[in-house]
Amino acid sequence: MKAMNIQRSRTVAPRIVLILSLLLCPLEATAAVDGALRDRMSHVSGTETLPVIVTFADQVATDGIIPLGLRGIEQRRELVRRLRDTAERSQKPLRDFLRGRGVERVRPLWIKNALAFEATPELVEILAAWPGVASVTLDGTVSLPEVLPAQAGAAQWNIEVVRAPDLWDLGLDGTGVVVATLDTGVDPLHPAMTANRRANASWFNPYAANCAVPGVICSTCDASADLPCDSSGHGTGVMGVAVGAGGIGVAPGAQWIAAKIFPDAGEAPYSAITEAFQWVLDPNGDGATDDAPDIVNNSWGLGGGTECLTEFRTEIQTLKTAGIAVVFAAGNTAAFVTSPANYPESVAVGMVDQSNLIDPLSSRGPSPCDPQEPFPELVAPGVQIRTADLTLSGTVQNPYQTISGTSFSAPHVSGVLALLLDAFPGLSSAALETTLYSSAVDLGAAGPDNIYGYGLVNAFNAFEALSGNPVVSLHDPVVPADDGILPFGNIPPGTIKDLSVTVTNAGGGVLTITSVGGAGLVAPFSLFAENCSGADLVSGQSCTVTLRFAPESHDEFTSTLEIISSPAASPVALIGSGNTAPVAPLLVFPVSGASVERPVTLGWVHPGDADGDPVTDEVVISTSPHLASTLPRSLPGGTGAILAGFGLAGALFLRRRFPLAGSAALLVLLAFLLSCGGGGGTAPPPLTADRTFVATDLAPATTYYWKIVSSDGFGGSSQSAIWSFTTR
């Protein structure tokens, strides 16, 4: 902790007015100050400072970028622009205020719309009341993961296990792919990684700026602003597994870049990690260039426990929106899970030994962040891994080490992702991850579990899965679900109805969807929501298109939904009617539960139709209380269903399809028309039946159930309550 440097200024009076207004004026809300910060505040003097992160309430809805139909660099460029603009708009008044108070080194964390700096307890209270501030938290730290001791083992066994050489034989080594790591740094002089370090924007060190301040004493690596370095060897070993040459790395043709989140003292501030994440999103600070990595490896965590620690959830969600795959070591905490590895957006990797058995220290689930999904998602070799070590400025002749831990399992998966992107450039991270899960070698209990996840990552299996032929499958919720027709039915004009079409890759390979909608989609049908545009669907993967039907008039409507994809999808026909169903009929007699003589006269009130459509009624009678087993009463042995008043055309149709039932329906229809006077008339006063039907030939001493179904001929129908009577 340090005493805050308070500078004198000519703007003292305005600052006092501003402070008083913040302290005395009623505010709509006060930001939350986390418990850890409150505890630290109680143990420091009023002039001492604490590292804090101030997060603003105004956040970019990253999922709102996806529907724009942007891909690759266009999507990342738009995302970065929105993040920077939002941060600038929200943060400027507070930055100006802090500058006036003499607060030094205020670091903008635009990836999550936050600021990081040192603050006194008094300033923390002011920040908590600042308009637009959502939270004030302690800038905590993350410890460097422990490297587990290991005996010397067979070199490259781990590379063989994930079947990377099988893809090398096909000419696939990760060329054209960039892998980033957030770690202790990387030794750029190591012979296995010298050639594939990216030439530009390959290094980020959040400690270098502070080390440049006169009087601040730093290690050589902490002060290195331009050249990658590593004083620990952890980061060098991790990157060696991912992209190292000479047989130690999975994807030796891939390029690497690195961010130093751990200072040489060992503990990484949360703010430094956030700065590294936002550097990954735009390494050279120019949103117009496409220099973001394809994969980010993270061999670190917030520690073991049973909580979902969300400190970095926003940052990782943002990277995923930008199309960057995020891989995390599951942790060496045995029965406990670690964050951010247990976020749904992360690919968590546990470790197995040479016998493909889980290591006792490999972290396992369930995950409190997403208990429905296995934790970890995958496993990879993590015991006795031969990889790169420090060269000590080139003086070590054989700079290799054999070590263990999930820190070295994770880069196997990062390397496999690089191999697949070499084979299938531009494939989305979501599609890649789904393929890794579906193609993994199942270990332990059958199916996904909280020890091995989906199984052991397998580069060749994943490649074969992506090399197949995609098949477009379209399904909707209306049976038959795959007929290419989406019927919305009848809804009253002025109302809306939403239905969805699910698009699935029912084959192999990759189903690429460019856009949905098309010129044939016309009112009153519209595209309400979708997550298909720009999607790459691997085998078994789906997306959804939701259509809205909103008729304004009483009419029948048709339209067409087009799904532009490769391979092509058939268009979906949309049909619907603007129509108000008839008012439900009201039963009058016999009163429900009555005992009646045969034949039985049934009476009901026919309320009519709001659209003025002609309405016909159907009388349904059954011995089943749910009217579940109704048959025409004229059939031998039937249970006594009577269908009446559904129209001459309906009866003739029945007679063509089912001669016996159709003939019975014609006879019943004639009886109904005679008793009801042809179905006409106007509605009498309530509870006075205006329509009747005489049910003959009912069995004696039997309980029957009946109802009336009214139809308007345009697909609209309604039905009465179900009543009962017992014949004597």
Image (spheres, rainbow, N blue to C red):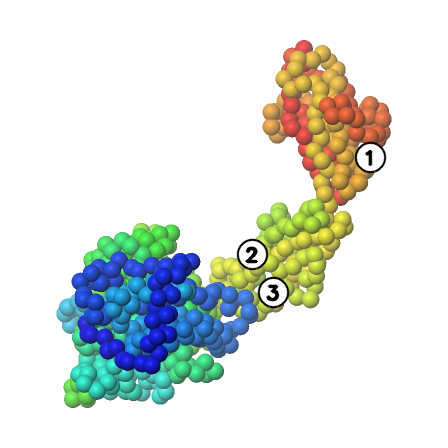
Give the quarter of the figure containing the C terminus: top right
> Which badge, 2 or 3, comes first in the chain's sequence?
2
**Residue at mark 3 to residue at mark 1: CA–CA distance:** 44 Å
Check the image and report above or below for 599 versus 208: above
Q: Which residue was labeled with disc 3?
A: 516
Extreme front residue here? 13
Q: Is residue 124 above or below residue 251?
A: above
Badge 1 amino acid: Leu
Pinpoint residue 245: horizontal percent, then vertical percent.
Answer: 29, 82
Q: In terms of depth relative to the viewer, which is nearer, 610 or 501?
A: 610
Q: Which element carries disc 1, helix, strand or loop?
A: helix
Identify which residue is drawn at 31% across, 68% down.
Answer: 53
Secondary structure beneath dot 2 equals strand
Residue 11 percent coordinates (x, y): 35, 78
Give the percent coordinates (x, y) of residue 397: 16, 87
Q: Nearer the viewer, mark 3 or mark 1?
A: 3
Residue count near mark 1 (Cα–Cα under 10 Å), binned few <14, some 14–19, many ≥20: few
First of labels 3, 1 by sequence position? 3
Label of residue 502 in the image: 2
**Given contact means CB atoms under 8 Å apart, are the residues at marks 3 and 1 in contact?**
no
The amino acid type, in three-letter code, at marker 3 is: Val
Q: Give the label, 2 or 3, closer to the camera.
A: 3
Which amino acid is tagged 2? Thr
Residue depicted at 75% across the width and 40% down the height: 610
**In this view, 254 is above or below 135:** below
Tag 3, which secondary structure? strand
Residue 192 is drawn in which quadrant? bottom left
Instruction: Note whether residue 621 is visible.
Output: yes
Q: How crowded is mark 3: few (under 14 residues within 10 Å), some or many (20 or more)?
A: many
> Which is nearer the eye, 348 or 123?
123
Foreground pick, 252 / 233: 233
Image check: 478 left or right of 694?
Answer: left
